[in-house]
Amino acid sequence: MGGRAVSTRTMKRVKYVQDLQTLLEGKQDLICRYHTHELGAHQIGSILLQQINAPRHTVWSIVKRFDRPQAYKKFLHTCKIIGGDGGAVGSIREVLLVSGLPATSSIERLEFIDEQQYICSFRVLGGSHRLQNYWSVTSLHEYEEAVSGRPGTLVLESYVVDVPDGNTRDETHMFTDTVVRCNLKSLAQVAEKLALQESTNRLSVSDGSEMDDRGKKT
């Protein structure tokens, strides 16, 4: 029996996977530098990826806002800067979590931010939650979306966190990965919505530029 024809969409998807592998291979130096962490005896770590169908500058405009993590992190209710200006390295924020969670607050410090490389990092200093000594690094990488050909963003987020007393390493991995994945998926939704708004605004401006003084298209 003959095999089924491979659709164009499937071929594009295969090409995307190949391009993604090439992208990651080309970023080995960056990944080794920023996403490789030394783990203590009672710590675990992981790295997660998220595709976002939005330009990197759009995603970065959300991620870099150390003073507004609640813009995409659904578990956060409010954020207050209690040290620094909220954008410089060393700035400290206090975030309050939404009600109904087994946690109430977190104190966090901006460890570094690189506007040229699209990388930022923060560390948890304290608070009432399970993610003690949590430290994460987030980097953004451009790629071409497989089907539409539009620019997209690949987000890499790595972390290190203590294993709480009474919990296993696997339990801590599962819990922390779930939180990070939820945040990354929410980031994708917010960024893609913002990218659509930006595209609509550009079209509106373009349309407006073709109007004469009487408001009619020329």
Image (spheres, rainbow, N blue to C red):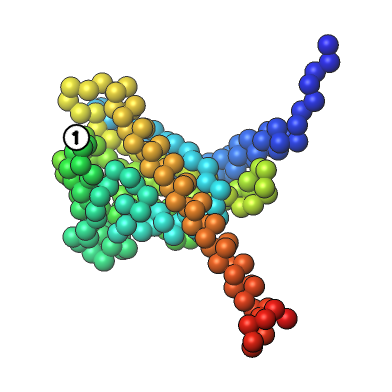
Three-letter code, disc 1: Pro
Quadrant in the picture for residue 64: bottom left
Is residue 100 left or right of 22 when viewed as pictured?
Answer: left
At 52% from the left edge and 46% from the top edge, which residue is drawn? 52
Q: Mark 1 highlights which residue?
A: 102
Locate the N terminus by quadrant.
top right
Is residue 181 left or right of 83 when viewed as pictured?
Answer: right
Question: Where residue 202 sits in the image (x, y, percent)?
Answer: 59, 68
* Residue 141 visible in the current orientation: no
At 71% from the left edge and 36% from the top edge, which residue is drawn? 9
Question: Where residue 205 sits in the image (x, y, percent)?
Answer: 59, 73
Instruction: Tell me: residue 40, above or below residue 170.
Output: below
Q: Nearer the viewer, residue 8 or 108?
A: 8
Q: How many marks?
A: 1
The crowd level at tag 1 (other Cα within 10 Å; few <14, some 14-19, many 20+) is few
* Residue 186 visible in the current orientation: yes
Q: Nearer the viewer, residue 15 or 73?
A: 73
Q: Nearer the viewer, residue 198 or 37?
A: 198
At 54% from the left edge and 52% from the top edge, which residue is drawn? 54
Q: Give the residue furthest to the top.
A: 1
Question: Where residue 74 sits in the image (x, y, percent)?
Answer: 33, 45
